[in-house]
Image (cartoon, helix red, strand yellow):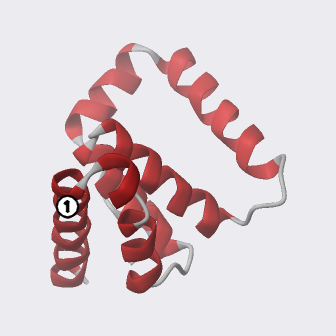
Amino acid sequence: MTDESRPLPETYTDFVARFPELAETHARANRSVVEGGPLDEATCELLKIAICLGAGLESALKSHVRRARSQGASVEAIEQAIALGMTSLGWSRTVAGWKWAHDQIARDASEA
């Protein structure tokens, strides 16, 4: 199942409905960064997983897990992106991120 076929979270759609220009600006900025460099989209999503892990953003990490998988990233690549955080972020944060990722992977598998 691709990320585009999933319904978006209600909070997100409510926010976009309230601030459509802000949402479009955000989307354009993201496209500009992804398309403006040598990294492919799957690698960009893996980096975003690592960034979300560092910031402790569970919902965002799960979203980027979905997107990474839709771009062809393997479960093992996602796990590596998370495990790389261990020496910088600590064991607890890394294990929490690993669980968040696997919660999303299991959810996606059950919805397929």
Name the image quarter holding the C terminus. bottom left
Name the image quarter holding the N terminus. bottom left
Q: Nearer the viewer, residue 90 or 100?
A: 90
Q: Place residue 102 in its image quadrant.
A: bottom left
Q: Nearer the viewer, residue 13 or 72?
A: 72
- Compared with 108, 23 (above or below) is above
Q: Place residue 33 in its image quadrant.
A: top right
Amino acid bearing label 1 = Trp
Q: Residue at x 68, y 31 (%)?
A: 29
Q: Residue at x 54, y 56 (%)?
A: 47
- Compared with 3, 69 (above or below) is below
* Residue 43 on image: x %, y %: 62, 66
Q: Nearer the viewer, residue 83 or 8?
A: 83
Q: Nearer the viewer, residue 53 or 30?
A: 53
* Few, some or many residues within 10 Å of mark 1 (<14, 14–19, 20+): some
* Residue 77 on image: x %, y %: 47, 79
In this image, 29 relative to 21: left or right? right
In this image, 105 relative to 49: left or right? left
Residue, disc 1: 100
Q: Residue at x 32, y 33 (%)?
A: 13
* Residue 9 on image: x %, y %: 25, 44
* Residue 56 on image: x %, y %: 27, 40
- Compared with 96, 76 (above or below) is below
- Compared with 25, 32 (above or below) is below
Q: Residue at x 56, y 73 (%)?
A: 71
In this image, 19 relative to 62: left or right? right
